[in-house]
Each structure stands twice: as structure tokens, then as C-alpha cells.
Amino acid sequence: MVPVLTSKSVSLQISPMQISAIASQGGGRMLGTEATEGSQQQSQIVVYPGELCRVALEIKNWESQPQHLTLKLRGTFPLEWCQVQADVDSAPQFKTAPQNSMVQTSGTAIGAGSDLVTLEVAAKKSRHADLWFLIPDDFFEGQDALQGSQGNQLNFQGCLSIYASQSLSQGSSSSPIQESNFELNVRPQSTYTTFLPIVYQEVDYIHRFIKIFEQAFDPVVNSFTSMWAYLDPLTAPQALLPFLAHWVDWSIDAQIDLAHQRRLIRRAVEIYRCRGTRKGLRFYLHLYTGLPLDEHIDREEDKSISITEPFGQGCLFGLAHVGEDAIIGGGKPYHFDVRLRAQPDSPIDEQLLRQIIEQEKPAFCSYSLRIEIEHC
């Protein structure tokens, strides 16, 4: 489309504010395009889904008297994608990000117009306004973009028209006194092109071609930046847990739930270091049951996980105290008692608990297990 000048009394200039606006195919059209008589130029506006795009408008009144002008917008794109602001520096507040909906038009026909703003332009003066575009975030992923005859449409046609407000108020079918056509190009945002020389960054084909490689390599690059999460049993995918368990020679028990397995694999080396000791057994039971270690409590019997040895020196005259440490026979050697104080809302599998103790204790030791439920 070619901008048409129907009146020399008003001029309209469209200036996209993006530095990365697409260069023209014929050797470099200017970003800003002013509608003048016989002009063959057309503004090209590049928009990225989910990002605000600002287009500066300059309306100049060449008459020697003020004019009331109404700015209208037509296009093959949804008109809810855009808003206009007159003499305001801040960006507009879109109520919600527009939902993805392809335009229900055929070919490149210009749809019905919509009034944007009415301005009073002083004689021999200019008025400035900003036209803002916001494309849905899921423009390229939405189902509407993948189906239908308009599914592959990336370039839309638009037209800004200026009408005399007086002629519109009279209800007559007046013609615009000025028009300026533009092309709205929806493109995916690319970071790879920032590494290219400026002359290549201005070529639309290179942008779209490089984006293919960016989408292919980005998952691989991102996996390197988050590699630590794959090597940590607490955050690694479940399918990778057997591999991490093999690293530390840990046998995965299907009876233990996934959350406990992750903690055990992560602390496996610490468990090996203290295996066969009271500290090691208490640490293992702490990881499985979630009960506190209570290392700040000195008396063993008062801890949530209590491991005591009941044998002593026996009943020796002059040394033993009746009722305290006088045990006939000296107790059972190599025997220890395990007592857990569990919460009512956190039941403990006694069979699995005995399996853990059998695995961690020295082979020649015996034990007794008691699970107490604390009541508030």
C-alpha cells in the first residue's frame, strides 16, 4: 500500500521507536515515514510478543487556523492490540495481556476503522501522540496461530487516517484528509543476532533464520547453566536418581518413598563415614523419620531418637548402688535399646525401621526397638 495525500493542510508522520526495526528490501527505507504527495514509502513496525512497542506520531497543521482532527485506525490485525496516548510520556496500562486471536479477515483487506483520539492542532503547529502495540505472549504457541488459513500470517497491514472532526459529527460519509499506511511485522525475539554486525541485524531474513538455531540450541545451553540441579539428588529428575545412587554405591529401596530416598542419597557418604556407630545409626534414622537429632540435649533418654546401652559392671560390693547400677549378671553384652518418640500425624513403618537398624548395626550386636507416640 502507498500513503495517499488527499490534503496539503495536514501531514502525518509515523516513526517506529525500535532500533531493530526491519530494514527495507530496496536498500534502506527510513524508519519514520511521512505522508507526502507521491510518496512511495511505507513504515514497517516490528513487534515482539509480550513486549510493548511504541510508535511516535506527529500531526502537523499547515493551515493558518486551528483544526480539530480525529485519528482513526484500520488494519488486518485485532484492534485491541493497540492503544494511543496523546501528550503523555509514560507507557499505557493495558488491562490484561490480549489473548491470542487471529484476524478473521480474508487476504490483506483493511478491516473496519476505530476512533483513537481527537486532537486540536494549533495553526502552523504540530501535535505528538504515541501509538502502542502489545501482542499476546503466546502468539507463536497458541492454538489459533497453528490452525486456520491465517495461521502462518506474520505481516499485517494497517492504515492511520485523519478526519476533520466537524465532518464526522455531521454524520456524512466524509473522506479522510490524510492517510498513512504501515506494515505490522510480528517477529520472535532473538538474542543471538546481537552478536552480529549492525548491518546484518537490520535484515529480517537473517533474524528469522538465526532464530531457528537459537530455538534448537537454547535447551542445550540452558541445561549447562542448570547442570548443578541435575547432580543434586534433591532436585534431579526421578529418572536420574539410580545413576546418582550408583555414584555413591547406594542401594535404592522401593519401600522408602521418593522424598526420603533423595535425602538418603544426598547424605550417603556421611552415613558411610559413621556406619556401625551410635552417631551413624541416629543420623540414618533422622533422615528417614524426620525426627530431630536433639544434639543440644545432653541426656540420651530425653532425645527424640534415643539409643542406650543397658549393660553395666554388675553387682560389686562396695561399688554398686542398689536401684541405680546394681544389675545382677551385668546385663546382656553388645545389646542396645532404640526408642523413638513419633508424632501422631507422622506414622513410622516399624518393619522398615528394623530393616534399617539391621543394616547399620554391627553384626554381633542385638537390639530392642520401641516406638512411642507423643500426645499433645
Image (cartoon, rainbow, N blue to C red):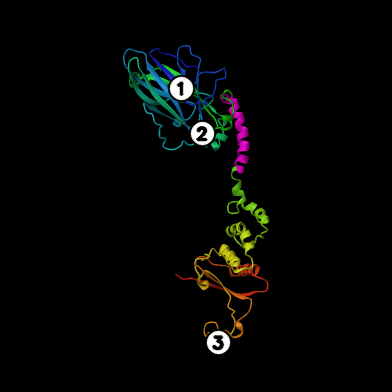
The type of residue carrying mark 3 is Gly
Q: Which residue is mark 3?
A: 318
Q: Nearer the viewer, mark 3 or mark 1?
A: 3
Task: Return the disc, 3 or 1, that comes first in the chain's sequence.
Answer: 1
Q: State which region is magenta.
A: 200-224
- Residue 74 lies left or right of residue 150; in this view the side is left
Task: Return the disc, 2 or 1, that comes first in the chain's sequence.
Answer: 1
Along the line of sight, the residue nearer the viewer: 305 or 83? 305
Task: Return the disc, 3 or 2, that comes first in the chain's sequence.
Answer: 2
Q: Nearer the viewer, mark 2 or mark 1?
A: 1
Q: Verify CB contact (< 8 Å) between mark 2 and mark 1.
A: no
The numbered dot on residue 72 is: none
Picture coordinates of residue 95, whole percent (x, y): 41, 37
Image point (42%, 20%), residue name: 161
In what element is the residue under mark 3?
Answer: loop
Category of crowding for the residue at label 1, using alpha-carbon neighbours closer than 10 angstroms: few (below 14), some (14–19), many (at least 20): many
Q: Which residue is mark 1?
A: 15
Q: Is residue 256 magenta?
A: no
